[in-house]
């Protein structure tokens, strides 16, 4: 399995259906994630053991771009959750806990940030 196929499966598992128009953005995100990982490791090539780390970073970068552009709002139905409503003189209070969009954003952040233990395992020290 190659990275692109793995990313498609990861996005599908997260509930996103990839469109044909997403292919260029996916390639860009894969290249960006690969370069970022190489820089973290101080390596010119990625070890095969980091295949799934690269997959998660690519999927996370793709979803972060889509989230920031507002393209995921309809797909995942993000909206502010109302805690209380008052009809007389109209008062609306939003829930103070994290919204679904904030939770999803945290999930994306965890995908984009590789585990420090994984980085430490493969990092090469430069002198």
Image: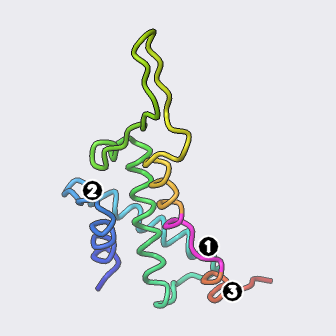
Q: List the single residue furthest toward the right.
A: 127
Secondary element type, mark 1: helix
Residue 24 versus residue 54 in the image, above or below? above
Residue 72 versus residue 59 in the image, above or below? above
Disc 2 packing (10 Å; few <14; some 14–19; many ≥20): few
Judge depth for marks 2 and 1 and give the one in front.
2
Q: Earlier in the sequence, mark 2 or mark 1?
A: 2
Report the residue at 66% width, 84% height from top. Answer: 123
**Residue 112 versus residue 78: which sits nearer the camera?**
78
Q: CA distance from mark 2 to mark 1?
A: 26 Å
Q: CA distance from mark 3 to mark 1?
A: 10 Å
Q: Position of residue 59 (x, y in %)?
A: 39, 65
Q: CA distance from mark 3 to mark 2?
A: 34 Å
Report the residue at 44% width, 63% height from top. Answer: 60
* Start-end of magenta stretch: 110-116
Q: Position of residue 53 (x, y in %)?
A: 48, 78
Q: Position of residue 18 (x, y in %)?
A: 24, 60
Q: Tell me the quadrant of the picture where the C terminus can be found.
A: bottom right
Secondary element type, mark 3: loop
Q: Which mark is residue 22?
A: 2
Q: Which mark is residue 39?
A: 1
């Amino acid at each position: 399995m190659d990275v692109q196929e793995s990313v498609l499966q990861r996005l599908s598992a997260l509930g996103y259906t990839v469109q044909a128009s997403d292919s260029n953005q996916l390639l860009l995100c894969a290249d960006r994630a690969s370069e970022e990982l190489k820089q973290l490791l101080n390596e010119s090539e990625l070890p095969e053991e980091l295949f799934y780390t690269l997959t998660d970073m690519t999927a996370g970068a793709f979803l972060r771009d889509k989230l920031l552009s507002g393209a995921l709002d309809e797909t995942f139905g993000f909206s502010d959750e109302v805690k209380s409503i008052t009809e007389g003189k109209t008062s609306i209070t939003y829930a103070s806990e994290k919204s679904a969009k904030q939770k999803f954003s945290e999930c994306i952040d965890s995908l984009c940030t590789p585990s420090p233990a994984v980085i430490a395992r493969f990092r090469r020290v430069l002198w």
